Amino acid sequence: MPSVVGLLEQRELVARRRVDGLREEADRVQAELAEAGREWQEWVIARRRVATVLASCGSTPAGAEAAADSRDADTRSAPRDAAKARSHVAVWRQGSDWSVVSVDYHRIVQMLADRARLGQGPLTCQEMAAVFGIEVVPTRVEALRSKAKRLVARGRLTEPAPGRFTLARGVAGPDDGS
């Protein structure tokens, strides 16, 4: 009769082999995904270059407007590696350029700058979602909270109380010249 420890060791060995196999498969899929993302990005760049060349020549091929409109859809459906560049928020310094910050961050900071100008206090992410006209559901609120926390970490916002955000001292909104 086999020992209990021996049976446990056999099952552990089988489980370890399965985990190793799944890790190898995950690594292969991750590498394939990265390659597909790079290839996709090259096609996006090529399409933009062709559109730029055609626009400079004054010709507008049929479907060029559709290609320009689909650019926004492509950006939203981009692989994670391609989307990360727009989610970067630089650390705030006096005279920081707002052109490096995406539109979502602009909206948050501009709204809080307007509130500060009016002498109004900090906002929660639920209140921000309501002001932006976004459906106030946990996923949308958490997305706003993530952006607000990133802005806090980069010195553009402060969090005077947990979950309440306001403009950091010395920071002006994107339209205020800072």
Image (cartoon, rainbow, N blue to C red):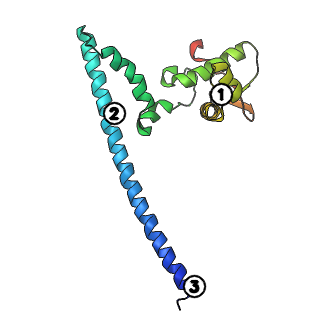
User: How far separated are the C-alphas under marks 2 and 1?
Assistant: 33 Å
Q: Is residue 76 left or right of residue 154?
A: left
Tell me which numbered mark, 2 or 3, is placed earlier along the sequence. Answer: 3
Task: Indicate the amino acid at tag 3.
Answer: Val
| Residue 3 percent coordinates (x, y) | 55, 88
Residue at 60% over, 13% down: 176
Above or below for 28 versus 102:
below
Q: Nearer the viewer, mark 2 or mark 1?
A: 2
Q: Is residue 122 left or right of residue 22?
A: right
Residue at 34% over, 48% down: 32
Q: Which of the two residues, 72 or 135, is positioned nearer the viewer here? A: 135
What residue would you read off at disc 2?
41
What residue would you read off at disc 3?
4
| Residue 107 percent coordinates (x, y) | 59, 20
Task: Indicate the amino acid at tag 2.
Answer: Gln
What residue would you read off at disc 1?
157
Toward the front, the furthest residue is 1
Tell me which numbered mark, 2 or 1, is placed earlier along the sequence. Answer: 2
Tell me which numbered mark, 1 or 3, is placed earlier along the sequence. Answer: 3
Task: Indicate the amino acid at tag 1.
Answer: Leu
Q: Which mark is residue 116?
A: none
Report which quarter residue 26 is drawn in: bottom left
